[in-house]
Amino acid sequence: MDFDIQKSISGLIDSVVEWSPKIIVALIILWIGFMIVGIITRFAVKAMEKSGLDKDLTPFLGSLISAVLKVLVVITAAGTLGIEMTAFIALIGMAGLAIGMALQGTLGHFASGVMVLIFKPYRVGDLVDIQGTVGHIEEIQVFNTIINTLDNKKVIMPNGIATSGIMTNLTANGKLRVDLNVAMPYEEDFGKVQGIIRAALDKVSERLPDEPTIEIEKFDESNVLLAVRPYATDATYWDVYFNSYKEIKKALGEAGIQVPYPVEREIKF
């Protein structure tokens, strides 16, 4: 019995002595290899940026290069352990199939990311409304699209979700209509108020030169509601929105036109 135990311990020690150098070499290869992969990936990304490559493709290709090189490093490390490459590649293939079945949704996000880069429904920097999230595209990654919302929140949206519904690209046409409403008293002349509003909009420097729409939208109980529609870029939208109201309020005040408001009537029984 004691002899069997000693023999087992001796065999274990021999195995440790035999495999220790190989394991250490494999770990060193992984450590150094991953460091080199990081350096190569950063260099490749910088080179792509300097070459003027589409900025949508740069982070996507960078992630892809990193993944491929890391797989090669792992294969090389496995080779130092004496694992045959054909068997290892077959093992990776089987594992890839199993992982693929388990991660069908993730692979779908990857495919959706490829479709976004090919058909370009949106690009980095575009102002979009995707699944109710409004903001600027910061980055298009392998699996996700990063959106910076107008209230300064970072939304990480899987590509499959981003492309599964209606996408509104607010930048694509080069300009946005700014929807404003101004109340006008019934006793005022529409042509006069229209001219005052147009002159006020001319003072809004951020506004695009397109002729704004200034028309009667509807008749309320206590005022005439005017539709005022100047144009802006996605970058100046809110400047035009707020400054237009500011200039219109100032101009109406200087012209002696008071904006009407509802008055509660006394109910007599």
Image (tube, rainbow, N blue to C red):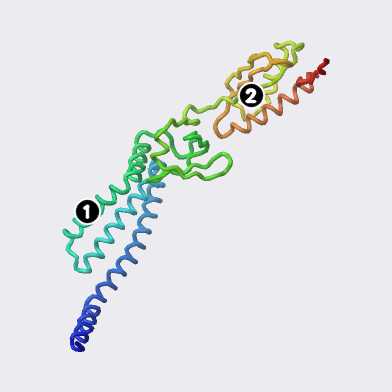
Counting residues from the N terminus, which is met first, the one under dot 2 or under dot 1?
1
Left or right: residue 10 versus residue 221 is left
| Residue at 24 percent of width and 50 percent of height | 97
Name the image quarter holding the C terminus. top right
Is disc 1 placed on a helix, strand or loop? helix
Q: Please state the horizontal and vertical placement of residue 88, each as a whole percent of the image.
A: 20, 60
Residue flagged by tag 1: what amino acid is it? Answer: Met
Q: Quadrant of residue 149?
A: top right
| Residue at 71 percent of width and 24 percent of height | 248
Identify the residue position indicated by label 1 in the image.
Answer: 94
Image label count: 2
Left or right: residue 74 versus residue 51 is left
In the rendered image, is residue 186 in sight? yes
Q: Please state the horizontal and vertical placement of residue 134, each as a whole percent of the image.
A: 52, 36
Is disc 2 placed on a helix, strand or loop? strand
Cα–Cα gap, marks 2 and 1 = 60 Å
Q: Closest to the observer: 110 or 242?
A: 110
Identify the residue position indicated by label 2 in the image.
Answer: 180
Q: Please state the horizontal and vertical placement of residue 251, each as a whole percent of the image.
A: 75, 23
Q: Closest to the observer: 199 or 66?
A: 66
Left or right: residue 269 versus residue 36 is right
Crowding near pointer 1: few (<14 within 10 Å), some, many (20+)?
few
| Residue at 63 percent of width and 19 percent of height | 227
Q: Please state the horizontal and vertical placement of residue 132, each as a whole percent of the image.
A: 50, 34
Q: Quadrant of residue 114?
A: top left
Up/down of 266 relative to 127, above or below: above
Residue flagged by tag 2: what amino acid is it? Answer: Leu
